[in-house]
Amino acid sequence: MVVRRRAAPILALLAAVTTAACTPPEPELSGEQVDVVGLWSGPEYDAFATVAAAWEDDTAAVVDWHGSQDIARDLATRLAADDPPDLAVLPNPGLLHDLVDEGALVPLDLDPFDQDYSPAWLDLGSDGGELYGVFAKVSSKATVWYSPPTFAADGDDVPATWDDLTVLADRMVADGRTPFSVVAPTGPGSGWALTDWVSQLVLGACGPQVYDRWVAAEIPWTDDCVRGAFDRFVALIGTPGYVLGGTEGILTTSDADGVLPLYTDPPSAAMYPMASFAQGFITSAYPDLVPGDDYGWFRFPAVDPEHAAAITVGGDVVVLMTDTPAARSFLTFLAGADAQAAWVELGGYTSANRSVPSDAYADPVARSIADQLTHAEVTRFGAGDLMPAELQRAWWAGMLDLVEDPATLDALLASLTRIAANAR
């Protein structure tokens, strides 16, 4: 079903967004259509439609959006019918690599993007040295949310390393405070938030080379450094007093509710490791809190300070499946700094485009997250999103078992190693 809507009241925001940002000059596109498939819905889709409307108005072309609930399945169906869309918005690079292997994607010219996107982000959208996708919307998974006033009142310093974090947690417990809120959100894919912990722990302890080999199943999950990440996670959630609500709290608290204990009076937990989209949970539940003053975040502490600049990320990547002038024009427009800045100003959006001005972001917290994402020296997608679906689902389920019974760790790592080997 084709769905097209416009958020008319805020179209004025896009007056300055024109295809002048696209190079080379626009071909004649009047009457052309661009068929786009993606997962966005609700406010997320409305913002996209508002930005897309500026391109439509400028070119007299039309964007036809086809919403999906299972994009891998829907793309497979269309490819089997020899009816690929022009563009697709993919939820992770894993699907990008699968589509490249199938010969379903068209490589992109680097020139329109290399000034606006760091090599780290271009690498994430590449396969075999060729650029196939540009990230339209991103999030950091290396954020720990906290209350600066509470830290200041209790004399707590933001931890720089994993050892600092555990020392701080021990002191909090000794003072009668609970250090962490930890969640495994219920619903489809329950367990994903716990795999994000492990992904960042592997990257921050082992570095990007080992991380890449682990994701590619070139080393086993029982590798000493990879296993060390699991050991650290198990030790943290198993330490008495560390986690609000213990095992039951982890398994029954949603990702949106996990941040709430940090800002109650008095707080019932001090830190919440969760992706940068948690800012939306905070502003929804506590609209009177002042960003940067009343709430903030710090970087997930690295185990090895040598890898402190490495972060895990998430995001949506736009790829070209049918090579037409209109499709290339629209993709280049979406990735450009003008469109990205307009998208940012609509709210709830972080751009990887480093040419988007910082004042496009409404508050200092959003700006600081964007700065981390656009200037990170090393970025890696969350490991689960890079792995085959069977392995990803097994890992999600295994993390839930691990929370309930840490003694399952050896069996889990052996099982994931077997599944990874068979899936490649």
Image: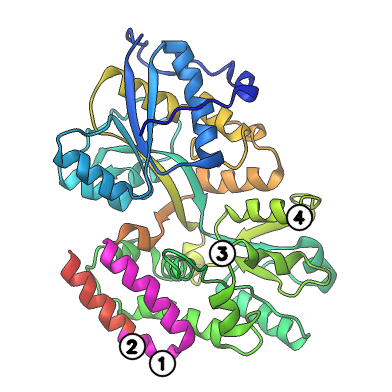
Residue with the mark numbered 3: 300
Q: CA distance from mark 4 to mark 3?
A: 23 Å
Q: Which residues are magenta?
A: 388-411
Q: Residues within 10 Å of mark 1 (few under 14, many from 20)?
A: few
Q: Earlier in the sequence, mark 2 or mark 3?
A: 3
SS under mark 4: loop
Q: Residue at x 48, y 13 (%)?
A: 57
Q: Earlier in the sequence, mark 4 or mark 2?
A: 4
| Left or right: 256 as drawn, with respect to 261 | left
Which circle marks residue 410 in the picture? Answer: 2
Which circle marks residue 407 in the picture? Answer: 1
Q: Earlier in the sequence, mark 4 or mark 3?
A: 4
Q: Earlier in the sequence, mark 1 or mark 3?
A: 3
Name the spot of residue 305 as percent of width and height, x first: 52, 67
Q: Quadrant of the N terminus?
A: top left
Mark 4 vs mark 3: in front: 4
| Left or right: 181 as drawn, with respect to 383 | right
Position of 68 relative to 211 (above/below): above
Name the spot of residue 292 as percent of width and height, x first: 74, 51
Amino acid at the residue labelled 4: Tyr
Q: Is there CB contact under 8 Å for labels 2 and 1? A: yes
Q: Residue at x 56, y 71 (%)?
A: 183
SS under mark 3: loop
Residue with the mark numbered 4: 286
- Main SS of residues in magenta: helix
Position of 314 relative to 147 (above/below): above
Location of residue 158 by image quarter: bottom right
On the question of residue 32 being in view, the answer is yes
